[in-house]
Image (cartoon, helix red, strand yellow):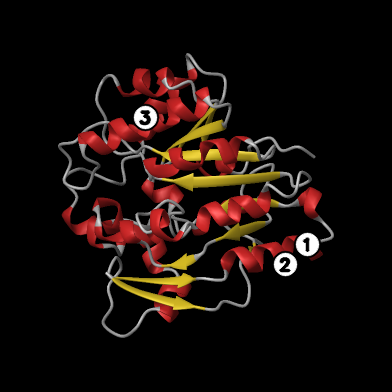
Amino acid sequence: MKIRFIQAKSILTPQKRGFLTAGARPYTHSLSWATGCQFGALYCGAFCYAQMLPNWHFGRREGEAWGEALIIKQNAPELLAAQLARARNRREMRIFMSPVTDPYQPIERKLRLTRRCLEVFACYEDLDLLLIQTRGPSVVDDLELIAAIPYAWLGMTIETDRDDLLFGPTKSQVSRRLAAVKRAVECGVSTQIAVSPCLPYSDDFAERLLETGAQRIVIDTFAIGDGSRGARTGASPFAALADYDWRDDEIAISLYHQLSAYHDSVEWSGAGFAGIPGRA
């Protein structure tokens, strides 16, 4: 993968409309310290909606495909510190970290940009919400720090527990993510599982999710969750090669009902993501 470093001018992106503002408690900002994603070369890169967004298309170089390059905002922690210090509305700030690049992709263990941003957040007690959304089980490195931020939530993506899908996680990836959620709960971190997008799953999937102890579970689909009613997914490499009908929302709806019978906080799509109770 090609790695490039830049000096960015801003790190908190205001959210005016779209998926993250679809619920009763909409996000006010997103935070992404990179353009591109190292996970883009894995199975999830085939259907990731972020490859369709302007920041990637205008940030990449000619000929670079999704998953081949990572453009890192190396001054992200310093920018965050400056923006929070001068913010007059911190009590209203609800921040999603990150909708377009994973905060715990492999290079985080070298650069520690996510950790350094968390250290900035830990200096403030008055924000309403910080959601740290990841597929990366290496988040366990920072659980103690996350637990010290009173408005922080961990969101762990677990799309399925099957390892026989053409575009799906391995058995090891699923096990490590489930274990990370359990560990986060044990550490006192407010934790949400995102089955997003929901892939075909085993008969035991709902039970495995419930066993983690996560406080919230959000279910999402390709057609709803890509922010374009399925158009972005339909234009992705995944759409032509998937070994099941990715437009079938019944897979997700069934899981929603299974979980709702045993869990009080099972939510749906954008309204679920933008429905986490805050501190304000």
- Which circle's residue, 1 or 3, is located before the other in the chain? 1
* Secondary element at image label 2: helix
Above or below for 213 versus 41? above
Residue 272 seen from this side:
no
Task: Name the image quarter holding the C terminus.
Answer: top right
Chain-order first, disc 3 or disc 2 = 2
Label 3: how many Cα within 10 Å (few below 14, some 14–19, many 20+): many
Relative to 87, is 185 on the left or the right?
left
Mark 1, other Cα within 10 Å: few <14 / some 14–19 / many ≥20: few
Residue under pointer 3: 178
In percent of width and height, residue 268 lies at 51, 36
Q: Quadrant of residue 38?
A: bottom left
Of all residues, the one furthest to the bottom in this rendering is: 62
The secondary element bearing badge 1 is classed as helix
Q: Residue furthest top?
A: 262
SS at circle 3: helix
